[in-house]
Image (cartoon, rainbow, N blue to C red):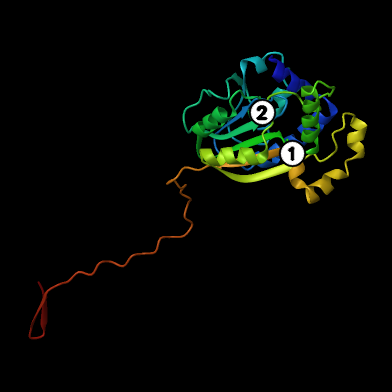
Amino acid sequence: MSGENYKLHHWFGTPPGRYLLAWEQERYDELVADIFGYHALQLGMPGLQALRANRMPHRWLALGADEAQGVPPAEGAADQGVPPALLAEAVALPFAEASLDLVALPHTLELSVDPHAALREVYRVLVPEGRTVISGLNPWSLWGLRQGRARLYQRLGGGGQPYLPDVGEFISPGRLRDWLRLLGFELETISFGCYRPAATKERWLQRHAWMESLGARWWPILGAGYVIVAAKRVPGMRLLEPSWRKAPRTAGAQVQVAVAVTGDVITLQ
C-alpha cells in the first residue's frame, strides 16, 4: 500500500476518523437507497460500504493496485452484501462509455493524482441522468483550519502535528461544485456534518456531541465532512416517462361522397 493510502486508512481507525466514517456511512445509506438502475461502482475506501443500501443487481468495488494490498476486508463482508472488488484506477476505469448508473467516490478525489481526470472518467462511464456521490474533508471547517495551521508551522520550521491525514489536497465543496458544472454535472444535494471540535480523544468527542444540532443549524457549511450528489446531464436528451393517461381519440377524417338525387331515390356515386 502506498504511503498516502496507508495514512488515510490508519487515520480512519482513530476516534475522529471513526466518528467521520460513521457519519458518512449514514449519509451514503440514505442517499443511494433510492437511486435505481442496474450497475453501480464504488471507487476506493474499502472501509466504507457506500453501496450497501443500494438495490442495483450489479455492484463493484474498484481499488487501485497499491490500495488493494494490505487493506483487510471488512468483517463479515460476504454476509453484508459487499460488492466484489476489482483492480482499477480512478483515471482509467475498465467500463464502457455510458454503462454505469451510479458511481460513489468516498475520498477518492483527495487521493487521486489527477482529480480532474478522475471526474472526467466518471462522467464518461455514467449513463445520461446517472448519479455520482462524492464525499470529502472540508478544508473550511474547524478540522481543516487546524490542519492548515499545523502545515504552516511545519513550513516555518516549527512543530505542528497534522490533525487530519497529511495526504493529497482537500477540495472545498465550492471548488468541487465548479468542477462538476464545468464537466456537465448538475448538483442535486450537498450534506455537511461532524461539527464537534478537533479533538483526538474519544471522551472529548463524546462531550461535545451537543454541537451537532447546533452546528447544523447555525454554521452548516463548516462541517468537517461533506457529501455531494450530482447527476450527469446531456444536452438535448430527456428520459421518457410512462404516460398514465390514455391518448385522446382523434376524430375520423371526413370523406366527401358524391350523391345523385332522382325523384325520391338517392344514389351514392
Q: Is residue 166 left or right of residue 198?
A: left
Q: CA distance from mark 1 to mark 2?
A: 15 Å
The residue sitting at 62% across, 22% down in the picture is 84
Q: Quadrant of residue 141?
A: top right
Q: Nearer the viewer, residue 133 or 40?
A: 133
> Measured from the top left, where is residue 13 in percent x and y?
81, 24
Quarter in which the N terminus is drawn: top right
> Measured from the top left, where is residue 48 in percent x and y?
71, 28
Q: Nearer the viewer, mark 1 or mark 2?
A: 1
Q: Which of the labelled discs sits on residue 140, or is there none? A: 1
Relative to 268, say whether 8 is above or below.
Answer: above
Amino acid type indicated by mark 2:
Glu
Residue on which the image places disc 2: 110
Which sits earlier in the primary sequence, circle 1 or circle 2?
A: 2
Residue 36 visible here: no
Relative to 36, say whether 217 is above or below.
Answer: below
Secondary structure under badge 2? helix
The residue sitting at 77% across, 34% down in the picture is 144
